[in-house]
Image (tube, rainbow, N blue to C red):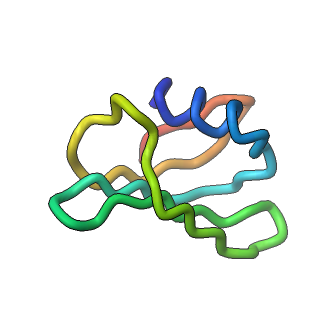
């Protein structure tokens, strides 16, 4: 999840509660919900992210895989 953490830091995004990152065939996006419950969809993925679907939660200053 380090690639995802670096991506959010680079974008200045810090109020994440949880989310899903998709890097499969034609779906390449990161969807997350902030601490206020607002959904945010980024139509890109971080460079170097492995293929798959990843559910995550921001906890203790780090992104944790669910």
- Identify the residue at horizontal 42%, vertical 60% (top origin): 29
- Identify the residue at horizontal 78%, vertical 40% (top origin): 12
Residue 24 in percent (x, y) is at 20, 57
In the image, farthest residue toward the bottom: 38
Residue 38 in percent (x, y) is at 74, 75
- On screen, 23 above or below 61? below
- Residue 39 in which image quadrant: bottom right
Along the viewing direction, whichever of 66 and 4 lies nearer the viewer: 4
In the image, farthest residue toward the left: 25
Callout count: 0
> Which part of the image, by quadrant, shows the N terminus?
top left
- On screen, 39 above or below 26? below
Residue 63 in percent (x, y) is at 58, 36
- Identify the residue at horizontal 49%, vertical 24% (top origin): 2
Residue 50 in percent (x, y) is at 26, 36
- Identify the residue at horizontal 43%, vertical 48% (top origin): 45
In this rendering, would 22 be left or right of 33?
Answer: left
In this rendering, would 25 be left or right of 17?
Answer: left
């Amino acid at each position: 999840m380090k690639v995802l953490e670096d991506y959010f830091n680079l974008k200045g995004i810090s109020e994440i509660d949880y989310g899903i990152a998709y890097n499969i065939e034609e779906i390449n996006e990161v969807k997350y919900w902030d601490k206020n419950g607002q959904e945010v969809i980024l139509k890109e993925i971080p460079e170097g992210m492995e293929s798959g679907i990843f559910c995550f939660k921001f906890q203790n200053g780090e992104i944790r895989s669910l």
